Image (cartoon, rainbow, N blue to C red):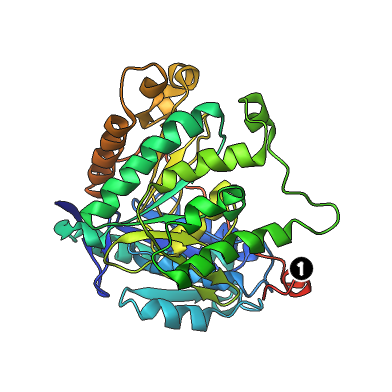
């Protein structure tokens, strides 16, 4: 079984062939946006945590290293704390083209935009010459995430994604799940699937560390957003037991590290992995993309609608009302499970087939709409130190 993707110099395969313009700080974001504007296949991103948030460079660098990216241009103000050179050095290890423009060095915003557009137009032109080639499933990495959850998420959408997860792993692909807070209450289920004792310790630590972060005064793990409550969910444990369904049933091969100065890439060769990070939708998807995930499968009962700049998102809903009202924004209808018209395995196979189609070039609905969300989140290093989690 194969998909049609793009070969990268480091041996990985991309499902998209985009040129990425990265503003290393939010001060340079407008220039980066204007460099990318109107050029097919070019997208711009940044982080909004300040120019001295040096630990965000790891995530930005990971985004550029994602195999869906053909080439990258960094746009720097010139005086920020985040240094562009180490980022370029790391991105260069993949063998893909990467360049840098500095606004203060060039001497004007207009001059920077002109030079930047010249660079990315050439990159985009070269990218368009690349043909798709067949790749084995072992070159594909898929992320699973849920948000805007309701009772149908745990009954239909997430279980069908879990069936897809098992199918992908069995076919040789890699699958990654993040959001540790939504595994609280499902520790035993996940730990029982660890490939060995070392991984079991990683899984339990992945969850217990997240619990510790919510023990500080003023914080509580017993929270859900308004949409979850309106959708019929009552406790975090109930939500967690529904959320983990999308992980399927295959052995957990490890927990991908994602902390200051360290963002572990998902390895080729297949298997199911967990990842350190947040439950917040867009930053969580950014983390998975930075770890090398090609495609994201997103379950939403209430109807979360967004896309991503790096990894295309396939949206799945298990709610018949949401499908009826928002089917123009959904890629997969899993509400047939709720209506008794289709099995979990049947919908899982449809999602699996959609993954192969998207990996081979089919545009998701969010891509058709031009939605290219991107956000970087980070742990508070002071809190991490206080809790002994560094």
Which is nearer the eye, 79 or 279?
279
Which is nearer the eye, 143 or 376?
143
Q: Tell me: 381 left or right of 275.
A: right
Q: Is residue 137 above or below residue 341?
A: below
Point out residue 309 in the picture as x, y percentages from the top left corner.
Answer: 44, 52
Q: Residue at x 62, y 25 (%)?
A: 232
Residue denoted by label 1: 383
Q: Residue at x 55, y 28 (%)?
A: 151
Report which quarter residue 108 is drawn in.
bottom right
Q: Residue at x 68, y 72 (%)?
A: 389
Q: Tell me: 33 left or right of 164.
A: right
Disc 1 secondary structure class: helix
Q: Tell me: 303 left or right of 237.
A: left
Q: Residue at x 53, y 69 (%)?
A: 201
Residue neighbourhood size for the residue with mark 1, other residues' Cα within 10 Å, grouped as few (<14), some (14–19), many (≥20): few
Q: Is residue 162 above or below residue 137?
A: above
Report which quarter residue 19 is drawn in.
bottom left
The answer to whether residue 154 of the structure is visible from this angle is: yes
The answer to whether residue 368 of the structure is visible from this angle is: no
Which is nearer the eye, 290 or 107?
290
Point out residue 236 in the picture as x, y percentages from the top left corner.
Answer: 65, 41
Report which quarter residue 224 is drawn in.
top right
Point out residue 302 in the picture as x, y percentages from the top left corner.
Answer: 55, 28
Point out residue 142 in the picture as x, y percentages from the top left corner.
Answer: 36, 53
Residue at the farthest right position: 217
């Amino acid at each position: 079984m194969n998909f049609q993707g793009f070969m990268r110099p480091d041996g990985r395969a991309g499902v998209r062939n985009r040129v990425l313009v990265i503003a290393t700080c939010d001060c340079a974001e407008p220039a980066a946006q204007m460099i990318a504007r109107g050029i097919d296949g070019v997208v711009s991103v940044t982080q909004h945590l300040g120019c001295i948030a040096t630990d965000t460079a790891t995530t930005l660098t990971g985004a550029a290293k994602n195999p869906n990216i053909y080439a990258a241009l960094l746009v720097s103000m010139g005086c920020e704390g985040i240094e562009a050179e180490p980022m370029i050095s790391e991105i260069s290890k993949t063998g893909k083209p990467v360049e840098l423009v500095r606004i203060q060095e060039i001497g004007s915003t207009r001059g920077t935009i002109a030079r930047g557009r010249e660079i990315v137009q050439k990159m985009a032109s070269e990218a368009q010459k690349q043909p798709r080639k067949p790749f084995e499933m072992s070159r594909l990495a898929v992320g699973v995430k849920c948000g805007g959850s309701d009772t149908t998420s745990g009954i239909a959408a997430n279980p069908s994604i879990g069936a897809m997860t098992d199918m992908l792993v069995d076919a040789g692909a890699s699958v990654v799940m993040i959001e540790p807070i939504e595994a609280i209450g499902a520790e035993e289920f996940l730990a029982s699937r660890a490939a060995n004792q070392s991984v079991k310790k990683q899984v339990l630590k992945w969850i217990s560390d997240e619990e510790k972060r919510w023990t500080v005064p003023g914080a509580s793990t017993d929270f859900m957003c308004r949409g979850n409550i309106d959708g019929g969910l009552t406790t975090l444990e109930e939500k967690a037991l529904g959320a983990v369904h999308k992980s399927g049933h295959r052995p957990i091969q490890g927990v991908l590290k994602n902390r200051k100065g360290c963002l572990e890439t998902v390895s080729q060769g297949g298997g199911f992995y967990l990842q350190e990070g947040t439950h917040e939708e867009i930053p969580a998807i950014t983390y998975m993309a930075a770890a090398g995930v090609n495609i994201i499968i997103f379950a939403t009962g209430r109807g979360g609608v967004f896309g991503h700049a790096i990894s295309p998102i396939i949206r799945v809903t298990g709610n018949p009302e949401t499908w009826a009202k928002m089917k123009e924004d959904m890629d997969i209808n899993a509400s047939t499970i709720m209506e008794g018209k289709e099995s979990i395995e049947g919908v899982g196979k449809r999602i699996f087939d959609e993954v192969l189609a998207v990996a081979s070039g089919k545009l998701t609905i969010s891509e058709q709409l031009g939605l290219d969300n991107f956000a970087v989140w980070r742990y508070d290093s002071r809190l991490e130190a206080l809790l002994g989690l560094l």
